[in-house]
Amino acid sequence: MIPSPSPPLLHPEVRDYLIARNYIDVELVQLTPRRRDPEAKIATARLFNEMLGDPQAAYPAVQVAGTSGKGSVCLALSQILLAAGQRTGLHVSPYLQVATEKSWVDDRYISGSEFRTACEVVRPVAEHFRHMEDCPTSVHGMASLALSYEAFRQRRIDWCVMETGVGGRFDLVQGLHRRLAVITDIGLDHVKSLGGTRPEIAWHKAGIMAGCEVALAVYDPETWPVFVAESQRTGCRLERVVPEARSAFHESADGALLVIELPRLKTVEVPWPFPADGFQRRNAVVAASAADLLVAQGVPITAEAIREGLLSRQMPGRLERMQQGPEVLLDGAHNAQKMAALMRSLPPFGGRRHLVLGATGERHFSEVIGALEERPWSVTVTRPLLYGKTVANIPEMVSQVTRLGIPVSAKSAPVRAIRAVLERAGPADQILVTGSLYLVGQMRNLWYPWEEVLKQQTSWPIERCSTLASPSTL
């Protein structure tokens, strides 16, 4: 939980934000669905939106689903649309530090006052469902989405890029004026609700193709037949993308170039500062391919807009460097697929690697640590501070790391964990904080205070804390 400052010290934007956040993320998050019924869940989400006047249908939308990469693809595509002169709303979830991070307009989060204004519009409808005895879905989830929908409607955006929450077919994102569906890599995650095999999970993701003119999906022989069957059932035209086949690396006098070959815009060359086989390459190619499909729908996107969009922003908390000497990296990899991709994408360094790990109670922690391709020098496990969610058991995490023969310690508080690691790390060492986006968000406050993120409407505010290389600064 974010601590509330004493009332006399509240900045107006912070005050408005905390009033609305207390309702959305405290009062409503305590509620649980009264019954489990996927079809009724979708009908209820549609009714919720309808009672608000269907703000989610006020603008054309691209919806993105998938196990890995969907948030980064959403951000890249929104930046491409912005570079093409389109006023763009972006919804991603979860947030790291403040709830306004879910709702971008162009290159900034909505303000604390906009957040409160949208919340006041949504609140009467949320109260209606809050008191429904047999509500089959999360009132908190519906209200959180509706807040973004309403903020976007008030800002009169040209395009919306929407990240799917869980799955797709029975996700709460419903009723969009969807012009394009994008499905990224499929892996094992949320198996309790989506199924224990990749084709089962792909079936849920493929649900976003319904009612859509065209869809783009990453090709994999195990899951591709699921997407083909859904496209035939719904009449949605399906285009496949193989990131490795659509891209290559060339060396130039100015450094490495990622060269992306697209069916319509042809060749796009992007100066590339990331590893050649990292997850950034896959996400970039998927986003560029999605933009290429929007060109076919008349959106004035150019190769230059794609180049600019791919280089303009990275998602906070995704392989994000916070300081050097020692190097501290934050990444929210929370399943085996994401962890394996992270290991392939880590920058080189000259010392020892230390991991700070946390996880929610829903995750298979053994699979996550099993995806570590190189044995770290040490592991410190800790507990992300969550409200309304369970976290992984620390003794069990210690036991599982011990089985791998890796030196492990435990600290219950995230700040104590990073302090302990900094005390033993050398200036050439690398510290990787990972396993949970919630943990990453809490650690990020040490470098970028959440109040500044909120007030400046960006995850990279001008005012930031100094280096944390000295543990005495924590």
Image: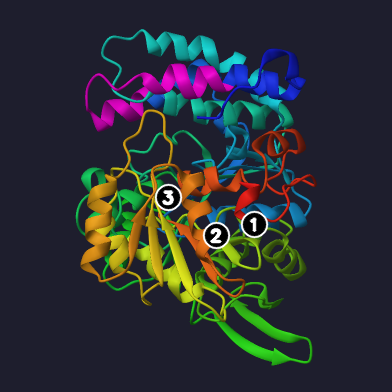
317 vs 310, nearest the viewer? 317
Is the Cβ of the residue at disc 1 closer than 8 Å to that at disc 3?
no
Instruction: Tell me the number on the disc at residue 422.
Output: 2
Quadrant assignment, res 101: top right
What is the spatial separation of the Cα atoms under label 2 and label 1, in whole angstroms? Answer: 7 Å
- Going by the numbered disc 2, the residue's amino acid type is Leu
First in sequence: mark 1 vs mark 3: 3
- Going by the numbered disc 1, the residue's amino acid type is Ser
Q: Tell me the chief SS of the magenta region.
A: helix
Q: In this image, 136 relative to 163: left or right?
A: left
CA neighbours of label 1 inside 10 A, class few (<14), some (14 to 19), many (20+):
few
Which-is-in-front pick, marks 1 and 3?
1
Q: Give the magenta part as a residue range.
A: 21-44
Residue 229 is at least partly visible in this image:
yes
- The question of residue 208 being in magenta is answered with no
Is the Cβ of the residue at disc 2 closer than 8 Å to that at disc 1?
yes
Q: Is residue 20 above or below residue 76?
A: above
Residue 307 placement (x, y as % from top left):
72, 69
> Element at badge 1?
loop
**Residue occupied by mark 1:** 470
Q: Is residue 283 above or below residue 364?
A: below
